Image (cartoon, rainbow, N blue to C red):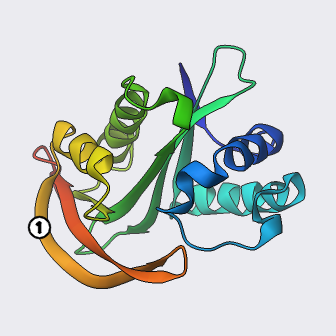
């Protein structure tokens, strides 16, 4: 798997990934307008993401096949906050056909290393719905610790859903 930062030029493969995985990701995702994953929408969103990358507020990674023609998974680092917080949020998804193969763990490990080494942040926050056992297992394998439980935390697929709150601390943080 090739891991890279998503940027302008990846519109088609990202649109294809989300359209192909719409049913698979629906129960874990917010409701989106029908055009949200069109090539045109991704073109605009990747420009915005590039601006966010340049100002240090987010970075989005994709894992692709060797020819870079198919997205295997995504891992986003967002809500980067400096000052006394020095933290960010991590979100991720994997193509249905690649579940259980360790690809998401590989992509998330890359993102974690980037956050701790390049961004030099203290904490990564990653939350999951209680029913998402795959996500729970991934976060445990990555070393995240459960820190709490938030009732009706995010609106997912049209309903307010509870979430388990998790974080990973950079033990080598010097701030």
Relative horizontal placement of residue 121, taking residue 37 as reference (left or right):
left
Q: Position of residue 93 (x, y in %)?
A: 49, 46
- Residue 60 position (above or below residue 44): above
- Residue 101 position (above or below residue 124): above
- In the image as oriented, which residue stretches furthest toward the right? 40
Residue plotted at (68% across, 55% down):
50
> Which image quarter is the C terminus in?
bottom left
Q: Which residue is mark 1?
A: 147
Residue plotted at (51% across, 59% down):
58
Relative horizontal placement of residue 86, taking residue 55 as reference (left or right):
left
Q: Secondary structure at mark 1?
A: strand
Count neighbours of disc 1 (C-alpha within 10 A) and say few if under 14, some if 14 to 19, many if 20 or more: few
Q: To which quarter of the image does residue 52 belong?
A: bottom right
Q: Position of residue 30 (x, y in %)?
A: 55, 72
Relative horizontal placement of residue 73, taking residue 142 as reference (left or right):
right
- Residue 29 position (above or below residue 145): below
Q: To which quarter of the image does residue 80 belong?
A: bottom left
Q: To which quarter of the image does residue 17 belong?
A: top right
Q: Position of residue 129 (x, y in %)?
A: 31, 65
Residue plotted at (50% across, 28% down):
98
């Amino acid at each position: 798997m090739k891991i890279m930062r998503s940027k302008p030029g990846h519109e088609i493969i990202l649109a294809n990934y989300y359209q192909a995985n719409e049913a698979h990701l629906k129960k874990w995702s917010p409701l989106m307008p029908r055009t949200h994953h069109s090539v045109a929408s991704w073109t605009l969103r990747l420009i915005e993401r590039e601006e966010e990358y340049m100002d240090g507020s987010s970075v989005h990674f994709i894992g692709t096949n060797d020819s870079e023609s198919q997205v295997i998974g995504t891992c986003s680092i967002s809500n980067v906050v400096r000052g006394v917080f020095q933290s960010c949020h991590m979100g991720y998804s994997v193509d249905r056909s690649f579940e259980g193969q360790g690809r998401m763990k590989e992509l998330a490990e890359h993102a974690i290393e980037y956050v701790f080494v390049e961004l030099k942040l203290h904490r990564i926050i990653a939350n999951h719905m209680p029913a998402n056992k795959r996500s729970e297992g991934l976060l445990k394998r990555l070393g995240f610790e459960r820190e709490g439980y938030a009732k009706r935390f995010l609106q997912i697929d049209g309903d307010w859903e509870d979430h388990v709150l998790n974080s990973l601390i950079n033990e080598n943080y010097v701030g």
